[in-house]
Amino acid sequence: GAGVSQSPSNKVTEKGKDVELRCDPISGHTALYWYRQRLGQGLEFLIYFQGNSAPDKSGLPSDRFSAERTGESVSTLTIQRTQQEDSAVYLCASSFDLGGYTFGSGTRLTVV
Amino acid sequence: GESVGLHLPTLSVQEGDNSIINCAYSNSASDYFIWYKQESGKGPQFIIDIRSNMDKRQGQRVTVLLNKTVKHLSLQIAATQPGDSAVYFCAESDTGGFKTIFGAGTRLFVKA
C-alpha cells in the first residue's frame, strides 16, 4: 500500500486478556519499528526489525510483550495478560535504509 | 540512560511569525537527527533531517540547526501558519538511523 497500515485503529480489552496489534509496512521497506506513546507524552522505543538481522528487543518493557515479523512484511505486536498501564497508542513505522520513518496512525489500546 | 529532551514543552506564536523549537540531546555519539510533526490522532510525520557532518539544513519553510559543541538542535519554521499547529519531536540516532530515540515533544500553538 501507499503507507504504513495498522490495525485495529482502536482496541478496548479487559485487564488480563491478550491482544495482538498488526502492522503492514510500506512495501520494500527493510526496517520496521514499534513505539509506544502514552497520552501527552513522547515516543517510547519498543523493538525494531532490520532485514534478516536479529531484532533489537531492548525496549520491550516486560516479558508480556513480544513481536514477530514475517520476512520483510507484516509484523504483529502481542501483549499478554494486559495491564491498565499498557493503555497507550502503539505506533508502527517503517523505513528503507537510513532515513526518516513513515509512521502509521497507530492503534489506541485501552485496558479496562 | 541517553535521552533527548526539549527546553520548552509549549510554544505559542502569532500567525505569520517565525517559530523556533529547541532540543537538547545527551548522546555525543549520535550522528543523525530528525524532526517530526505529529497532529492530533495521527502518527508522527517526517519533516527534516540532518547529519552530524552538517550544522544547517533548509527545507521548505523549515530550517534545522545543529550545534554539536553544546549538543543542541533547533527547528525554525518561517511564516508560521495555523496548519503548523502540532506537537514537534526531535529524535536522534547513533546506529545509522535504525534505532531512533525521541524527545518528549513541544506543542506549537499558532494564533490567528
Image: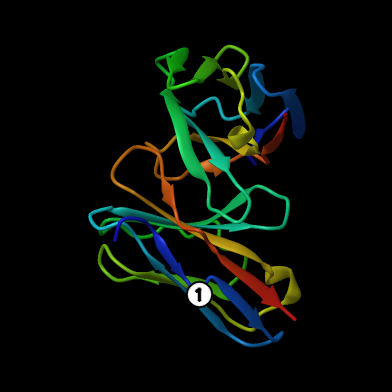
**In the rendered view, would you say A105 is above or below A69?**
above
Instruction: Bin the neighbour count of mark 1 within 10 Å (Cα to Cα): few under 14, some 14-19, many 20 and up.
Output: some
Query: Circle 1 — which element?
Result: loop
The reply to whether residue B8 is visible in this rendering is no
Residue under the point 76% across and 28% down: B12
Residue A22: image quadrant is bottom left
* Residue found at the far left of this picture: A28
Residue under the point 54% across and 25% down: B28
Whole-percent x and y of residue A92?
A: 46, 59
Q: Which residue is mark 1?
A: A8
Which quarter of the image is occupied by the C terminus of chain B? top right
Left or right of B13 in this view: B52: left
Left or right of A95 in this view: B80: right
Residue under the point 63% across and 51% down: B40
* Residue found at the far front of this picture: B112
How is the model colour-coded? rainbow
Q: How many numbered markers are drawn?
A: 1
Whole-percent x and y of residue A29?
A: 28, 53
| Badge 1: chain ID | A
The reply to whether residue A84 is visible in this rendering is yes
Identity, as a three-letter code, of the amino acid under mark 1: Pro
Residue B20: image quadrant is top right
Whole-percent x and y of residue A62?
A: 61, 69
